[in-house]
Image (cartoon, helix red, strand yellow):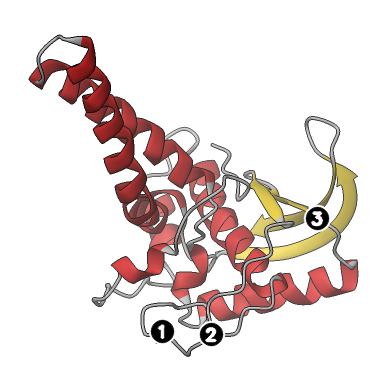
């Protein structure tokens, strides 16, 4: 289960979150693994979710963000800074970081990102350019398009209008629903990750990147 921060997103999804959430518990993933250790691949899934959150938080930190929560912004307040030249790809062993970054700055950013995530800044785990949002958008578009096709008359004009409505509605809903999917499905606070090493390497497709190697700890 690989996820990427390269997918282009629209407006910030954080406006959707105007209510409190149950705080993540430091032992929740470790406890789950102990009780369900017989499930094949469970540890790898839990690792990817935590790595995914750390990837997003690292991109935010490297982008120079100091006020990443947009929920209380005003016309004169600062918006979240997002460097679109940075991106990431998560795996069960760590994540690739793409972009021109000084390795010393990257080391500091990863350490700071993990510290901020595990000390209450949980919104750093959610990123508007995450591939989750793109996947959610495609699923919404397909589902709404099928619904419009079944509900509307079979004439070509009506079907084209329905397809346009489906695409527009999906585009409006995808950032918020994608952010929910990130928060509850594809990311988890990295309470169990230990940063091992950061190296300059190439990814599966031969692209140059940094790889942030992590290990699981109880």
Q: For numbered disc 3, what is the local secondary structure?
A: loop
Q: Can residue 217 be seen in this view?
A: no
Disc 3 or 1, which lies upstream in sequence?
1
Mark nearer the N terminus (2 vs 3): 2
Q: Nearer the viewer, residue 72 or 123?
A: 72
- What is the crowding at mark 1: few (fewer than 14 residues within 10 Å), some, or many (at least 20)? few
* Separation of marks 2 and 1 at Cα, in angstroms: 7 Å
Left or right, residue 36 beside residue 44: left
How far apart, in angstroms, are the residues tagged by discs 3 and 1? 29 Å
Could you say where residue 32 lies in the image, as x and y percent from the top left?
A: 38, 54
Q: Specify the label residue 78 is tagged with.
A: 2
Foreground pick, 75 / 173: 75
What residue appears at the point 59 percent right and 55 percent down from the top-left corner?
A: 51
Q: Is residue 68 left or right of residue 104?
A: left
User: What element does badge 2 sit on?
Assistant: loop
Task: Establish if 97 lies above or below 166.
Answer: below
Depth order, front residue of 55/35: 55
- Residue identifier under label 3: 99
Q: Which mark is residue 73?
A: 1
Crowd rating for badge 3 (residues with CA inside 10 Å; few <14, some 14–19, many 20+): some
Among the two numbered marks 2 and 1 on one chain, the one whose residue lies closer to the N terminus? 1
Whether residue 116 is visible to the viewer of this picture, yes or no, is yes
Can you say whether 146 is above or below 10 in the image? Answer: above
Relative image position of residue 164 (x, y in whole percent): 30, 30
- Of the 4 image quadrants, the one containing the N terminus is top right
Q: Name which residue lies at 55% across and 75% down.
A: 80
């Amino acid at each position: 289960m690989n996820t990427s921060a390269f997918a282009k997103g629209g407006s910030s999804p954080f406006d959707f979150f105007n209510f409190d959430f149950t705080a993540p518990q430091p032992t929740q993933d470790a406890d789950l693994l102990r009780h369900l250790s017989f499930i094949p691949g469970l540890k790898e899934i839990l690792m990817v979710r935590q790595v995914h959150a750390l990837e997003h938080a690292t991109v935010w930190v490297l982008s120079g963000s100091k006020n990443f929560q947009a929920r209380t912004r005003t016309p004169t307040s600062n918006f979240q800074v997002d460097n679109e030249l940075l991106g990431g790809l998560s795996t069960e062993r760590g994540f690739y970081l793409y972009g021109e970054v000084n390795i010393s700055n990257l080391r500091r950013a990863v350490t700071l990102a993990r510290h901020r995530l595990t000390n209450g800044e949980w919104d750093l785990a959610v990123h508007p350019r995450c591939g989750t949002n793109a996947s959610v958008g495609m699923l919404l578009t397909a589902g709404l398009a099928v619904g419009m096709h079944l509900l509307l008359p079979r004439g070509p004009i009506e079907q084209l209008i329905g397809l346009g409505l489906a695409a527009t509605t999906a585009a409006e809903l995808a950032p918020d629903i994608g952010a929910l999917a990130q928060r509850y499905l594809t990311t988890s606070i990295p309470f169990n990750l230990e940063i091992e090493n950061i190296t300059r390497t190439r990814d599966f497709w031969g692209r140059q990147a940094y790889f942030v190697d992590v290990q699981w700890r109880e």
